[in-house]
Amino acid sequence: MAPGAALTWELADGVAVVTFDLKGEPVNKISAAVKQDLLATFEALEHDTAVRAVAFFSGKPENFIAGADIEEFVRLTTAAEAERLSAEGQEMLGRVARFPKPIAVGIHGACLGGGLEFALACGYRVASDHPRTQLGLPEVQLGILPGAGGCQRLPRLIGARAALDIILAGKVENARKAFRLGIVDELVHPAILKDVTIAAAQRMAGGWRPRRKRPGGFRGWLLDGNPLGRRLVFRAARKQVLAQTRGNYPAPLAALEAVEHGLTHGMAEGLKREAQLFGQLAVTDVSRKLVQIFFATTALKKDFGIANPPPPAVVSRLGVVGAGFMGSGIAGTAIAQAGVDVRMKDADLPRVAKGLAAAREILDDRLKRRRITPYEHARLVALLSGSDHYTGFGRAELVIEAVFEDLQVKQQVLREVETATARDAVFASNTSTIPIHRIAEAASRPEQVVGMHFFSPVARMPLLEVIPSARTAAPVVSTAVGFGRRMGKTAIVVKDSPGFWINRILTPYMNEAGYLLVEGVAIEEIDRLMVEFGFPVGPITLMDEVGMDVGEKVVGVMYEAFGERFAPVPAFAGMVKSGRLGRKAGKGFYKYAGGKKGSVDPAVYEVIGAHPNGGPRPAEIIQRLVLVMLNEAARGVGEGIVRTPRDGDIGAIFGFGFPSFRGGPLRHADDLGAARIVSELERLAERYGARFAPSDVLRDQAHHNAKFYPNA
Ligand code: 3HC
């Protein structure tokens, strides 16, 4: 082997056991150097007559191959270069697929993108039945497509429908699901992965060939095994992609084309088209933005948000006070993701029972979606318990309160928890707006108090804001961030200031929607325009989701702290008074029936005292909603609410779905340019009031031609 080579091999009974271990890197990835190494290794194996078959493994304990080296393709500047890169990858895997001796791969850990494409080019795939073993083609999440033959080999292996389902959404599946789909031929315990794979290689060397069922059975053949059925499949998929991406993300449509082209015109033509489309996508602005988000999220996985972070405390028992929607969401998610013992507490037993049932639903849902086995489900359910007093809290290393958003109530809970817990237990408040130092005023151990702001519904929303006060001890911050991460959240550490980051920038946006309503813009129109801009839902729907009572409280706190520009829109007050709290009340701006959102409730216009008559033109509506948010975000950065623009952007994308193809509010501000934003804000301020007055941060940037990301 060449010095520093990533691949090594040894011969055992005629089988070359190849190990891929990229030295000095936490994951195996396929770079240009690795490609050379792979080609050289396979050439040697081909010519070595003692080698009758190949068994291929990763030398990393926790991952197989994480895909092509992302850093390599983001450096490319032209579509032609990127197309060449894809074609070279295809050519290499073509050699693997045509290799004259059988190859079996033993997969343990992440097998993603180019990693899966490699495995697909091999003759037999064995996977370990371990939660870490994940297989998928996440390329479209990076704004590209599987460009090393994945758009061709996966549909041929498992059928067009199943393959599109994975490729177009950039899905990653666990080993069991991959086995059910036919991506993996054999599923085994990790302890015997190596032996089983080598045995398969040996069997193949003896002439045995795996027999695979026709993908999808007869129904599968009807739909994607013939041209007519296939056309239907592609038409339906295209419609779905357009509905989901609204033309903002080019990768899924391109991937669809690559798959269709290959199935219609054959493998060689398909590969050619795949490489061309890969080339075009790799240099788009959308792909650049999505890759930046990948690296930002990866960096956040190791960032505890403070300098020299001490190690987090080991949390094995969690106390949750408040068994409402948030409390039960936190409890259920903590068990499902972190496998900790959870004790819930609320004022009376009926509430506790309701909370326990809601927390259990999260576990039931995982079972239903086959994320966990019935055995694991039973084990996890047994970790959940509750009471109307604090028994069991004495052993909790961390307690999260999720009671009503009211300073006195939260302080009272804090006092009770302090008497019920050990001295070194951490008390975390799931407050959305009330500063932590205010809550901690009631504490006898203020250094143990921190904020952990989760988003609703907790099981699905990926963001956590961690808020230390000036007195919070460093290990407490690490513990909150570390535990949030174990719950599967991306955590950003934000400054202890009213509304923190998310509500700080969301409130002016929601309020602006209220002003627009009063000016006669229809509810659907506001929501439609923001969805077109790229948000998953519009601001009015978001208000219904959050709850008008919650929103009213948030605005109240923000108004008190920051004054006039946060003044609540009077129209919204009627909503709470009339019980139109949103989805949870079954009525808000929209109608809700059986948990499903219906049409706008026309009666709501009476309540808010407004009538749709058109209002400002669409471009003006979009500008008002977006710029008011960007302006506040800039102000927040200036005040150090987030530590870096990166945290601010990831927070907005993960916290409320700021369009990721725009890179987040601060990257979007950079794209627009501070000078342009300032002049638009000045115009809006003149027309609609001082709430649009440009922030000093933007004025400064405009003056110095500066940006949030100077090196981008
Ligand atoms: N390229 C470059 N770097 C990568 C990488 C990749 N494909 N995958 C992971 N890394 C890096 C990370 O940036 C991180 O770097 P750092 O230590 O310098 O910060 C390091 O590897 C470790 O990664 P994580 O911290 O994310 O480790 P985890 O164990 O938490 O997760 C993982 C591992 C599940 C593999 C996760 O890293 C991941 O999802 N990686 C990306 C997978 C992906 O998108 N693959 C497709 C690539 S594109 C492709 O293959 C194109 C092809 O079709 C031609």
Image (cartoon, grey):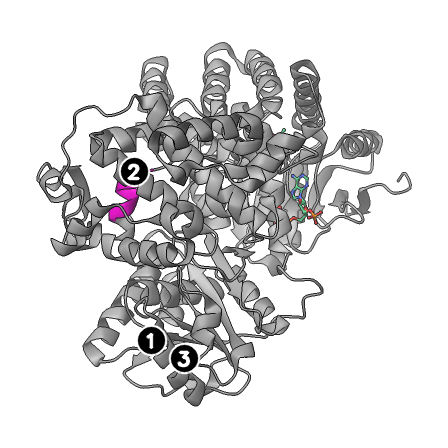
Q: Residue at the far right: name it.
A: 3
Q: CA distance from mark 3 to mark 1?
A: 10 Å
Image quarter where the C terminus lies is: top right
In magenta, the rendered stretch is: 537-544
User: What residue do we see at 53% from left, 23% from top?
Assistant: 152
Secondary structure at badge 2 equals helix
Type of amino acid under label 2: Ala
Q: Which residue is mark 1?
A: 408
Q: Which residue is mark 3?
A: 414
On the picture, is 180 further left or further right than 582? right
**Can you say whether 461 is above or below 247 in the image?**
below
User: What residue do we see at 64% from left, 40% from top?
Assistant: 104
Secondary structure at badge 1 equals helix
**Can you say whether 294 is above or below 531 in the image?**
below
Q: Earlier in the sequence, mark 3 or mark 2?
A: 3
Q: Position of residue 527 (x, y in %)?
A: 28, 33
Q: Earlier in the sequence, mark 2 or mark 1?
A: 1
Q: Which residue is mark 2?
A: 513
Relative depth, front residue between 422 and 445: 445
Q: CA distance from mark 3 to mark 2?
A: 36 Å
**Can you say whether 334 is above or below 386 in the image?**
above
Relative depth, front residue between 46 and 670: 670
Label 1 Cα crowd, 10 Å radius (few <14 / some 14-19 / many 20+): few
Secondary structure at badge 3 equals helix
Relative depth, front residue between 172 and 452: 452
Label 3 vs label 2, nearer the camera: 2
